[in-house]
Image (spheres, rainbow, N blue to C red):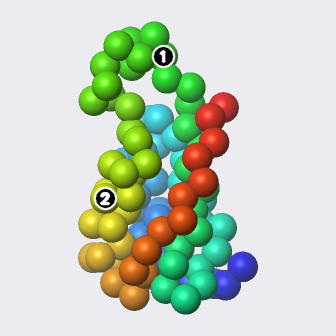
Amino acid sequence: MARDALAQFALTNANTIVAPDGKLELKDVRDNVAYIRYTAQKPSQANQDCAQCAVGPDDLRDFLRDVFQRSAPHIKDFEIEFEEI
C-alpha cells in the first residue's frame, strides 16, 4: 500500500464520526484516488424503518470528499468497498 500520511489523517478524522456505526480503513492511495473499506454494523430494526439513518454509498462519498478536501486535498476520488458485519 502506498503510504499517504495526509490521507490517513483525514480518514482518522472521518472515523471519529462514523465510529458508532462502522469503521473506515485506508487500503491504498494511487493516482490521487483513495481506496477505502467501510465495515458497518448491520442496521438495527429501528434503522431499517428510517431511510435517513442508513449511510449509503453516495452519502459516504460526499462526507469523505468534505473531510479530505480540508485535510488531504490531493485526493480527488474514492473507491469504497462496503462490508457488513
Q: In which quadrant of the rendered image does the C terminus lie?
A: top right
Q: Is residue 46 above or below residue 18?
A: above
The foreground one among 39 and 82 is 82
Q: Is residue 79 above or below residue 83?
A: below
The foreground one among 8 and 54 is 54
Residue 45: horizontal and vertical position, in percent?
45, 10
Kind of residue sitting beneath label 2:
Asp
Question: Which quadrant holds residue 51?
Answer: top left
Kind of residue sitting beneath label 1:
Ser
Question: According to the image, label 1 marks what residue?
Answer: 44
The foreground one among 57 and 43 is 57
Q: Is residue 74 above or below residue 11?
A: below
Residue 84: horizontal and vertical position, in percent?
62, 35
Residue 44 in sight: yes
Question: According to the image, label 2 marks what residue?
Answer: 62
Q: Few, some or many C-alpha atoms within 10 Å of disc 1 (few <14, some 14-19, many ≥20)?
A: few
Residue 24: horizontal and vertical position, in percent?
54, 54
Question: Which quadrant holds residue 10?
Answer: bottom left
